[in-house]
Image (cartoon, rainbow, N blue to C red):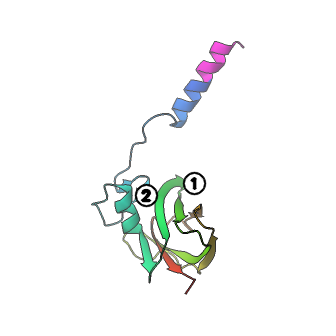
Amino acid sequence: MNLPVIATVLIASIAAAGCGGNKVERPGFVFGCPTGDNKKISSKDDLIEAKVEVAGSLPNIEVVDMRCTDRADLLRIDMDLKNESKDVRRIAYRFRWLDKEGMRAWDDESWKPLLIYGNTLYTVTTMSPSQDATDFRVVIMDQDK
């Protein structure tokens, strides 16, 4: 097999897999994430504000990005947290899983502790516990108090 044939097959495979093109959002989804009942999400900041709840205060920790995809009919979420201080910060987080009507689809997860070193970015990755969990909220709290 010569190089042009291999390149053609590779390009066709990438196009068939949906890579390399613009992702078309499904109704009720923005940036790959479900909007739930909040239809006014038009930016990543709006998405983060709609999905993240801070319990108390969270000094120097910021959610800077959130990405969602479907994997085998389960929702996968990547959330980037940034520690903007030079000190190590201790936080805890948990996800609340909701069904398509906005009702709880699963019991609340237990709190997960997390150390984020100074001036670093940490990505939290999780999967929904069932196909019924089609939406989510994440709760984050400070553990350094």
User: The residue under label 1 is which amino acid type?
Assistant: Ala
Task: Name the secondary structure under disc 1.
Answer: loop
Residue contact at pointers 2 and 1, CB within 8 angstroms: no
Determine which of the numbered discs, if any, sits on residue 102 in the image: none
Of the pair 133 and 44, the residue shown nearer to us: 44
Left or right relative to 60: residue 89: right
Q: Residue 145: horizontal and vertical position, in percent?
A: 55, 87
72 versus 15 height, above or below:
below
Q: Is 125 drawn above or below residue 15 in the view shown?
A: below
Picture quadrant where residue 144 is located: bottom right
> Magenta segment: does it hold 7?
yes
- Measuring 52% from the left and 76% from the top, which residue is drawn there? 106
Frontmost residue, 69 versus 132: 69
Q: Earlier in the sequence, mark 2 or mark 1?
A: 2
**Figure check: 5 above or below 129:** above
* Magenta span: 1-9
Res. 72 mark: 1
Residue extending farthest left: 40
Label 2 belongs to which residue? Answer: 33
> On the picture, is 131 further left or further right than 2?
left
| Secondary structure state at the residue bearing disc 2 | strand
The residue sitting at 34% across, 55% down in the picture is 43
